Image: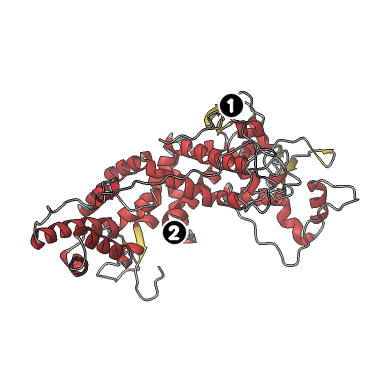
Amino acid sequence: MIGVTFLKKAAEPEGMLRPAYAVTSYEYAGDAVLPPGIGSVELRGPYDVKGPGESPSRQRIFVCHPAEGAGPAVESRCAQQIVSALARRAFRRPVADRDLQPFMDFYQSFRKESSFDGAIEAVLRRLLVSPDFLFRVERSPASKSEGVSRISDVDFASRLSFFLWSSVPDDELMNLAAKGQLTQPAVLKTQVTRMLADRRARALVENFAGQWLYLRNLRMHTPDPIEFPEFDENLRQAFEQEITLFFDSQLREDRPIPELLTARYTFVNERLARHYGLANVYGNHFRRVELTDPARMGLLGKGAVLTVTSYPNRTSPVLRGKWLLENVLGAPPPPPPPNVPALQEKVAGVQAKSVRERLEQHRANPACASCHRVMDPLGFALENFDAIGRWRTSEAGMPIDASGSLIDGTQVNGPTTLVDALVARKSEFVGTVAQRLLTYALGRGVEYYDQPAVRKIVQDAAAENLTWSAVITGIVKSVPFQMRMNDVEGATR
């Protein structure tokens, strides 16, 4: 471990972390304007290296080491053993001699001009540009009489691994697939449990949540510095870390999926706690805290969600309502009609109006009213949160009106009553999550003929309290996940 410190002053209060920019003047140079800070740390070395050394990566590649001067035959046998192990992992399937021969020819060619290590390096480079590595190829069965067929256990192992780990299957998955045992119900359930407990399942949290909840947009979202001078890179990173830790805890603790909307805890550091108005949280490390404010509970109280569903200079009940319809209720609104005028923004010298007042003028257009009467009440319920997720009670000098009537007549007034209304439709929420997870797992959109499978996933998971593992297990056991369209005339992939 390497530590860096100022010897005469070992601590400095954390301030605003500005976005990266090129220094074009001396305005920010020296400690006359800002306290001293670490710009960069550079580590050099090692020097006088005697050999390639050992590392976990080298140890995985070089499963054998021919002795110096062992001769071409011994080296060739060792090379074949190395290439066979590498190809099996890279191609995600058992490899035969005919698969290895082109790579062994490549090895022999390079071994004439370089060392054993250099020839293995050349083969590794060749493996990493092979189509079998770059593409996931699921082969159709020899008989194509039917439009759909079950994929092989080997192909299934790749589907499963890329779904839960965003990476290649490990040896345990490959060995079970090679024996034809992976799709057996008891074996499959055990493997799903093992894979979700593995640290590599963090990829499911980051990639799936980033896509489903639009959290990837957070890194590109830039709130107006005039309207929100408090927003900085520290806060942006804290938003991202909070939602990642929260989603990861829900998955690892195998909580019921509806608890995403009602969880009474979150993860904060001092910067984020100050933003939320939470007391007695100090330091930059994140820790789990219990929430007493019901408005902050669950997904809808998270700064990341509230920020990416706002404009840079103001909140947007339309964006937030649309986000809830698409990602929570699974009922996306139709696209807006053409040539709809934008919402009138604030004008200097003119009495400012609240977003609700401006939207009421916008809804006077009959072409807009039909969609807005569905979206806007959902978004208005979150109006107490500003465009960077702070709690507020007024806007433009007027008290916030967070009341509204949902399309089914349910009355809501603020985030707490909105969550209650959404939890009352928990089957719709879980169905939306299952559909989005299936889309993520398959790498394609869910079509009308997939809907029976989605409904079965939710029905089966209900017997296990709608937990994450129950829904994920239902997905990997489903027909869309275990079957594929064959390349026959009239069929589509």
Residue 464's image quarter?
A: top left
Of all residues, the one furthest to the bottom in this rendering is 489
Q: Position of residue 292 (x, y in %)?
A: 62, 26
What residue is drawn where x is 57% and y is 42%?
237
Quick one: quadrant of the N terminus? top left
Q: CA distance from mark 1 to mark 2?
A: 42 Å
Instruction: Return the x and y of residue 460 as percentages of the image width and height.
Output: 41, 43
Which type of secondary structure does the marked residue at label 1 adopt? loop
Asked whether the viewer can see residue 136, the reply is: no
- 302 vs 410, left or right, is left
Residue identified by numbered label 1: 282
Label 1 Cα crowd, 10 Å radius (few <14 / some 14-19 / many 20+)? some
Q: Residue furthest top?
A: 280
Circle 2 packing at 10 Å, graded few (<14), some (14-19), many (20+), is: few
Q: Earlier in the sequence, mark 1 or mark 2?
A: 1
**Residue 443, numbered label:** 2
Front residue (pair 266, 51):
51
Q: Is residue 197 visible?
A: yes
Q: Quadrant of residue 419?
A: top right
Instruction: Please name the amino acid that badge 1 sits on.
Output: Tyr
Q: Amino acid at mark 2?
A: Gly
